Amino acid sequence: MVARAHTVAFHGVEARPVEVQCAVSPGLPAFSIVGLPDKAVSEARDRVRSALSAMAIALPSKRITINLSPADLPKEGSHFDLPIAVALLSALEVIPADAAEGTVALGELSLDGSLVPVVGALPAAMTAASEGRMLLCPKASSAEAAWVDATQVIGADSLGDVVRHFSGQCPLPAAQPGEVNLTPSVRDLRDVKGQERAKRALEIAAAGRHHLIMIGTPGSGKSMLAARLPGILPPLTAVEALETSMIQSLCGLLDEGGINRTRPFREPHHTASMAAIVGGGKGAKPGEISLAHNGVLFMDEFPEFPRTVLETLRQPIESGEVMVARANAHVKYPCRFMLVAAANPCKCGYLTDPSRACSRAPGCGEDYLNRISGPLMDRFDLRIEVPPVGFTDLDLPPSGDSSATVATRVENARAIQADRFRGMPEMRQNSDAEGKVLEQIATPDAEGKAVLLKAADRFGLSARAFHRILRVARTIADLDGSADIRRPHVAEALSFRISARVMA
């Protein structure tokens, strides 16, 4: 007789179903696990044996074989402990066989039989729901899994609780979803003195999810401006929150099972490796660009990042997803993020400051900014110079709109885009529009088109730049509440694209 239980193996954000088969047969006493397990899965036999011993359940003096099917799918992680224990208890007739087969289980076992929380409970619940089974997991992981209301989620503190639940002695209650977290930003745009043009660029970038690069002298406020970007972004929608939380669940970043409605804001250091930014390492884990999915990736000191790291951003920026290809794994992760970069104009930082003469001008600035390749710079929709703020300006009262006021305009513009792209899941903001859709939604009037064509001919804009200007103009028109793209909208979009010292 072969007893069966079910669990999952993680492949990117996808949780693939795995059947755990347990056979207890005559022969020399042995406990073997087959089916391409890694070291953590192979060690499960010792943890399971100790946990059963703590419950006063002795293993028979027979040959115990655990098969993880499909056998050609790599199995990684300690979450296979609980399903192996459930299949073994079913084979020993401690729990009913039908209860074990109707459950997707995952969890790590301690030597005393208690259950340790594991990552990936949310994607596992999605798979359990698609298969029509309930999910059994550690109690500490059940709150995040319970957000999938299409299936029942049971959280247990120990293997003994699991046995009592399946035997009907003490049924466990269904888990409840964790709290919805919406952390308000305490940083206000009005804290930034001056820099009205940069604030306007932030508003446009937030409204249409456009990529932005800021170039200015040290201390001009680039990082300060970027830090206030989360305060003007709208909360995650239900679909976006689920997508983002699945990635965070795989990385163990969900706090007490709560779903976060605040958009991610990731700011890696410029010494970060390619695997840290794009993804990779052991198990091809998601990188910063995937952790910033539906949010912001802020890269300060942009030219200081290794050239190979910067060049790997080109394809994910366009496609919204990244394929982490390794010798033993090919994993695809979503990465629809807004890239915000900050850079000094040169190595010393004062090339554009008239009060401090740079002895190596202009070659210093050309050499420094040339670390950013032309194709990568071409992908920035908005390019602005951030001039230094004078000491006298610091004593002036706050100027411009508050973050709350700007956030309202951004949310209204995104609501217009949500209606515009309804029924097109691959397009959510203006920056996603392409092809015939872009032609339909971003065709300027006659005067606007004439200005755009003249600028494209004068500055030799690429086809990508031409289309990105149209997308920015569409966003500016949405912020203005205009159904048509007029000449002022195109002119403003061009002003953020063409700059004497920012153009690549």
Image (cartoon, grey):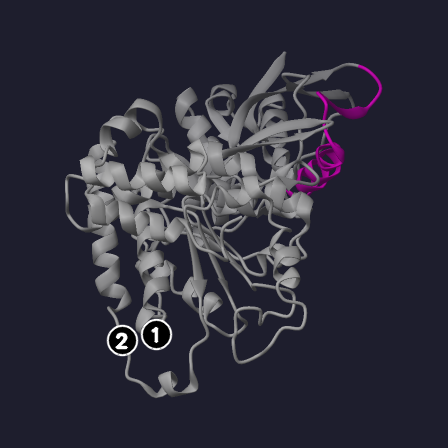
Q: Nearer the viewer, residue 368 or 3?
A: 368
Q: Which mark is residue 399?
A: 2
User: Within the magenta stretch, is there residue 414?
Assistant: no
Q: CA distance from mark 2 to mark 1?
A: 7 Å
**Does dot 2 land on a helix, a strand or a loop?**
loop
Q: Nearer the viewer, residue 365 or 384?
A: 365
Q: Is residue 160 left or right of residue 397?
A: right
Give the residue drawn at x 65%, y 21%: 73
Q: Do the CB atoms of the residues marked 2 and 1 lie less than 8 Å apart?
A: yes
What amino acid is at disc 2?
Ser
**Does dot 1 land on a helix, a strand or a loop?**
loop
Q: Nearer the viewer, residue 251 or 221?
A: 221
- For disc 1, the neighbor class at 10 Å (few under 14, some 14 to 19, many from 20) is many
What amino acid is at disc 1?
Gly
Residue 424's spot in the image, x, y percent? 29, 27
Q: Is residue 442 left or right of residue 328?
A: left
- For disc 2, the neighbor class at 10 Å (few under 14, some 14 to 19, many from 20) is some
Q: Residue furthest right?
A: 28
Residue 430 seen anywhere in this rendered image of the structure:
no
Q: Is residue 98 left or right of residue 361?
A: left
Q: Which mark is residue 194?
A: 1
- Numbered range of the magenta stretch: 27-56
User: Within the magenta stretch, is there residue 42?
Assistant: yes
Which quarter of the figure has residue 281? top right
Residue 68 seen anywhere in this rendered image of the structure:
yes
Q: Quadrant of the N terminus?
A: top right
Residue 113's spot in the image, x, y percent? 62, 44
